[in-house]
Image (tube, rainbow, N blue to C red):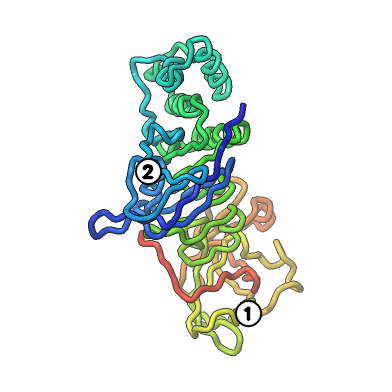
Amino acid sequence: MEATSKRLVLENISKHFGSLVAVKDVNLVIDPGEFICFLGPSGCGKTTLLRIITGFEQQTTGNVLYDRKVINDVIPQKRDFGIVFQSYALFPNMTVHQNIAFGLKMRKMPPKLINERVGEILQLVGLTEWATHYPSQLSGGQQQRVALGRAIAIKPNVLLLDEPLSALDAKIRVRLRTVIKKLQEELGVTMIYVTHDQEEALALADRVAIMRDGEIRQIGSPFEVYKKPRTSFIAEFVGTSNFVTGIKKDGKVKFGQLTFTVSNLEKIDTETVYLAIRPENIEVVDVTISSEKCVSSNVVEVLAEVINFLGAVVRVVFILEGEEMIVDLPEKAYEKMSLKRRDTMKLYFPPDAFHIYSELFRKLI
């Protein structure tokens, strides 16, 4: 079962609501069969951009091209795109079978072919035994699978999903992520997925487009945006980072009473520098790294202030030069240390584990 997807291109897309600029100069090429996530905080423009692609919102400037044709004036029903919203929008008086068949009936498909197609979809989304049930008889996760089934039943070339899992509990979200990813791979359909959940975006996407203030600030594979965040905002928003504000001095960074050796420091020409380091990249001396492999200036002794057991990872809060920071320890390393609150740890900050920025974004809590 395949969808003959075509390339989708956004050219200089902007959207103004009066003086508010919701989307600003977005240029993006989405290849056939690609799974792309628009990721960002509330109000960043990701849903507005999705609505422009669907045709529910008209851009102020720019063009949407599909299969090399400008589709700015094509109404949503004629764009051949499937859409799944956060609210499932199922017909309460229709069974699961009838909900999935709805789009096919609107397209005047013969009843026999409708039944065959709905049977295929029910099997794909794992709801064959629920075909005669009504939405009120289903769980939230099952209702979302019906919404997915209805969207893919028409064999869209592009499937757009607007925070489809945000109303579900954590375990169901994780299970449905797997369902969505398998569907996308089996069908070969282009998927555009909007979410504010960075874990969801990293788990699903071929590429993640990170948005802020209506602009795409970085786009790349999940590995790229996590390992090489282009700005301090991205380092903060995607995953978790510890931040250090320091002064460049003699080729190193002075932070309070500490002086860190930092790789690639010459790339930043400002005196004040902002360093970010992931909690999992901080090492524990003689536990996760031998002392012989450490640069001495980057070894710091701290107290374990708070210990949070998270299963495979143990998160430890410590204070460094007045700043609250965290280190993530593998469960086995934590067990080996027999660490307790207020115990002393020797931590190592590898020079090449720092990301260096000339500006600092700090999330307001």
The amino acid type found where label 1 is placed reads: Thr
Residue 188 image offset from top left, x and y in percent: 60, 35
Q: Which residue is mark 1?
A: 261
| Residue 203 visible to an observer of this rendering | no
Residue 249 image offset from top left, x and y in percent: 56, 88
Q: Which mark is residue 51?
A: 2
Task: Count residues near mark 2 (Cα–Cα under 10 Å), then give few for <14, some for 14-19, many for 20+.
Answer: some
Residue 141 image offset from top left, x and y in percent: 46, 28
Q: Residue furthest left?
A: 18
Q: Quadrant of the C terminus?
A: bottom left
Residue under the point 39% across and 49% down: 49
Relative depth, front residue between 18 and 296: 18
Residue at mark 1 to residue at mark 2: CA–CA distance = 47 Å
Task: Tell me how many marks there are.
Answer: 2
The amino acid type found where label 2 is placed reads: Arg
Q: Is residue 134 above or below residue 256?
A: above
